Amino acid sequence: MSTRFINLVLSFMSKSQTNKKVVSVINVSKFYGSNSLDSKKVLSEVNLDIFEGEILAILGPNGAGKTTLINMMLGRLSLSSGEISLLGHQPGNIELKRQCGAMLQVSSLPDMSTVREHIELFQSYYTNPMDYSQVIEFAQLSELESKYSRDLSGGQKQRLLFALSICGNPKLLFLDEPTVGLDISARRSLWKAIIELKHAGTSVVLTTHYLEEADHLSDRIVIINNGKVIKIGTPKEIKSEFNSKTIRFNSDVNAEVFSKLHAVKKVRTQQLANQEIQIEIETSDPINTLKEIFSAELIITDLTIAGAALEDAFIKLNQKSKQHEGDLS
Amino acid sequence: MNKGKVIDPVFDKLNLVKPNLINIYYMEAKTETIRLFRTPGFCIPTLLFPIMFYVFFGILFSMNKATMPTYLMITYATFGVIGPALFSFGVGIAIERGQGWFDLKEVSPMPASAYIISRIVLSIIFSLLIIMLLFSIAAIFGDVRLFHSQWILLAIILILGSLPFCAVGMTLGLFLKSSSAPATINLIYLPMGFLSGLWLPINFLPDFMQSFANLLPPYHLAQLSLKVVEMDIGAPIILHIGVLLLYTLFFMFLAMKAYNKKDKQ
């Protein structure tokens, strides 16, 4: 009881998310091409808000428009229509840049500068930079300070890019696939650093292909497909929209039991390997299926029941969006 | 959650404070200069090529020991100061654009002027080194004798004269792809140097080439410098300065347009 109370107090204290809007994207569209006949629409009437201390993940398949949206927020791309406001400024404004950090996908850094030189240079651009030692600690670069960037591994370069994005003590941080090339422990350290920044009040816009990362880090997720926002919600809300459960167990299931399981409404059964059975249920209530399994009096081991993963929801949402567009055309 | 209010910049005190611009210029120039001094692929050809050519054609195989060492010292110094301007800007920017590093700097609060000034400083440092090396070799081995004021005036003209080539380099760097930039810039630099009479005295070239040289900025910089030792062809100073200024403005305009163009990726 006392532990639970302490956890509650701690979670209340660390709750840094407020209702202050830091990013406002209103009816933003982007198309390339000079006239309506050959123009290609890459973003269509996107609306979203980002709040102080919030981590927002932008997800979508390749070519969905994620990078275009980020580039528009960073002021690198013009808007065809709509409006974007970041911390009360237009994208690209120098005052705004002093309050933002960005980690873009950079293939390599200037070879003959050391980690320390890179960080100190970027710190000089900002009014209120983070302490050098704090940057090093956040990005876990303490043993690499005097190394030239040409001698860094892919993961170490990613960590340096992360250091450059946070060294200005940003209020708003853009992270474009920040953990690409990182091993599991480095990835988890970076997640920890991102969460610490969020607790300090930094808002984070994150794009990633690792859905586990989005699930773990983000307060809300935006799913974009074909330039359109197809879903906005918390990871829990998105997952719960697909009321599916997956039951897994090991057992020697015969054909009769298999057909019985198939007969249960909204159930899909498959044998994964030898004795491993996977049953997907399209409802949140697995009771009927479990009853069927137990009534067969099988010898069951390693039984697990899991809710829908974000990955399942992501795939289904994208399929749904594709189908909808197919129907329209 | 959607009822939030956009933070008003008026109440955001951080907006009122500006970073130290001089410190940004200093840091940018220092980092860039140290980095390039650590890059032998840039330093060695930039410093050694003009000196090597001068030693061969101006001293060892000189056809006229009285005038050639002085004349070619000036034309090879012109050739030398153009190199860092074209390469540090042109190749440097093109490579950084290809890597995505330029984009990262563009979205950072680094003022664009810091990026340009740091490279101008770098170009001036390399130009000074080339000028000092060439002048020393010419004085010691080529027996070139000038008044102090002439040495100083030559150095000033050459350093200031490298600025139009910084603008040319910047434009090329913003338009060329990283893979093709070194070859393309060499293709411009070397023939332009030859056609401007920087490798051999201009009167050694056929007439049509001599008239074509009038259109090239290195020719005008060389003529301006040769005027200090009264070895130029006698055109007015204003013409040389005017052409160099025109080139500078034209390429600066193109570079600004390319830099400010959104949707450039």
Image (tube, rainbow, N blue to C red):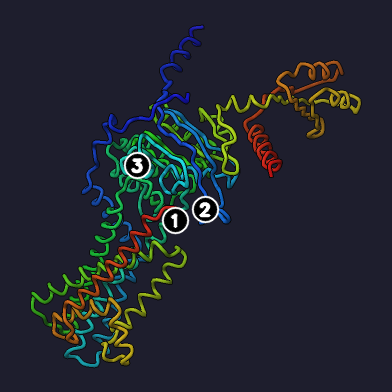
Whole-number angstrom distance, CA of label 3 to CA of label 1? 19 Å
Image mark 1: chain: B
Residue A85 x/y as whole percent? 40, 37
Residue A67 x/y as whole percent? 51, 45
Please indicate whether residue B176 sits to the left or right of residue A236 in the image.
left
Please name the amino acid that badge 3 sits on: Lys
Dots 2, 1 in contact, CB < 8 A: no
> Which residue is drawn at the image coordinates 67% and 24% (left, top)?
A307
Image mark 3: chain: A
Please indicate whether residue A264 sits to the left or right of residue B97 in the image.
right
Please name the amino acid that badge 1 sits on: Lys
Residue B185 x/y as whole percent? 39, 71
Q: Which residue is mark 3?
A: A97
Check chain identity for marks 2 and 1: say if they share one.
Answer: no
**SS class, disc 1:** loop
**SS class, disc 2:** strand
Q: Quadrant of residue B177?
A: bottom left
Q: Which residue is mark 2?
A: A32
Say if A115 sits above or below B250 in the image. Answer: above
Please name the amino acid that badge 2 sits on: Tyr
> Which residue is drawn at the image coordinates 37% and 41% (left, top)?
A90
Residue found farthest to the top: A1
Whole-number angstrom distance, CA of label 2 to CA of label 3? 26 Å
Image depth: mark 3 or mark 1 in front: 1
Q: Foreground residue, A194 or B238?
A: B238
Q: Which residue is mark 1?
A: B264
**Quadrant in which the C terminus of chain A is drawn:** top right
Residue A139 visible in the shown view = no
Q: Quadrant of residue B55?
A: bottom left
Say if B39 sits above or below A258 in the image. Answer: below
